[in-house]
Image: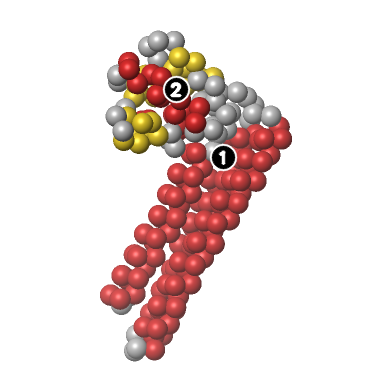
Amino acid sequence: MNEDLDFIFAETEEKMGKALSHLEKELSKVRAGKANPQMLESVKVDYYGVQTPLSQMSNINTPDPRNILVQPWEKSMLEPVEKAIMAANLGFNPQNDGTQIRISVPPLTEERRKELVKTVKSEAENTKVSIRNIRREAMDAGKKLEKEGVPEDLVKVFEHNVQEITNEFSDKVDKMIEAKEEDIMTI
């Protein structure tokens, strides 16, 4: 293929990869009834006047599927951490035992599971739209290069390759969503 087309193809593949990574990150935030340290990713604690992510000032573990343990590196931060978890409005009720904070993750109701599946599917559709937009940009760039003198057969090969990676990334989105849906619906 032509160097310009190769560059556009590589850029397209990279953008689609970023869209997939974003979906992965969003899916990790959706709680499936099992305790996960990422559930506390959005919690910020007032650490000597600076809003600091909880993960940067404590150890966060999941000793079992129903509990999260938070151990601040400084015992004096136990109370501010507990308040920050409550203020984050995640539906958790942290228990401070003087050395660590234990969070019991309540099991999800059937209704809540169905809501989460809808959320996940919506996120997947947004990712697919993003992937299709990336494909369209690449196709437009290919057509523009064809008008500038790149041989038509090279552009056709390029368009075919772009469509193939678009299909590949769409399939990956479907597989990720299928796995997450199964995870959410499993009690």
Check disc 2 and report its element: helix, strand or loop: helix
**Percent of width and height locating residue 27:** 51, 42
The disc at residue 180 is 1
Do the residues under discs 2 and 1 have CB atoms within 8 angstroms? no
Q: Residue at x 42, y 72 (%)?
A: 138
Q: Residue at x 42, y 49 (%)?
A: 21
Quarter-of-image position of residue 58: top left
Whether residue 120 appears in this view of the structure is yes
> Left or right of 118: which side holds 2?
left
Q: Earlier in the sequence, mark 2 or mark 1?
A: 2
Check disc 1 and report its element: helix, strand or loop: helix
The residue closer to the viewer here, 56 or 118, is: 56
According to the picture, the residue beneath numbered tag 2 turns out to be 82
> Left or right of 133: which side holds 185?
right
- Mark 2–mark 1 Cα distance, whole angstroms, equals 29 Å
Q: Is residue 59 above or below residue 96?
A: below
Residue type indicated by callout 2: Glu
The residue closer to the viewer here, 109 or 132, is: 109
**Percent of width and height locating residue 60:** 39, 24
Q: Is residue 134 above or below residue 100?
A: below
Residue type indicated by callout 1: Lys
Q: Is residue 12 above or below residue 68?
A: below
Whether residue 160 appears in this view of the structure is no
The residue closer to the viewer here, 152 or 98, is: 98
Q: Residue at x 29, y 29 (%)?
A: 48
- Number of labelled discs? 2
Q: For the N terminus, which image quadrant?
A: bottom left
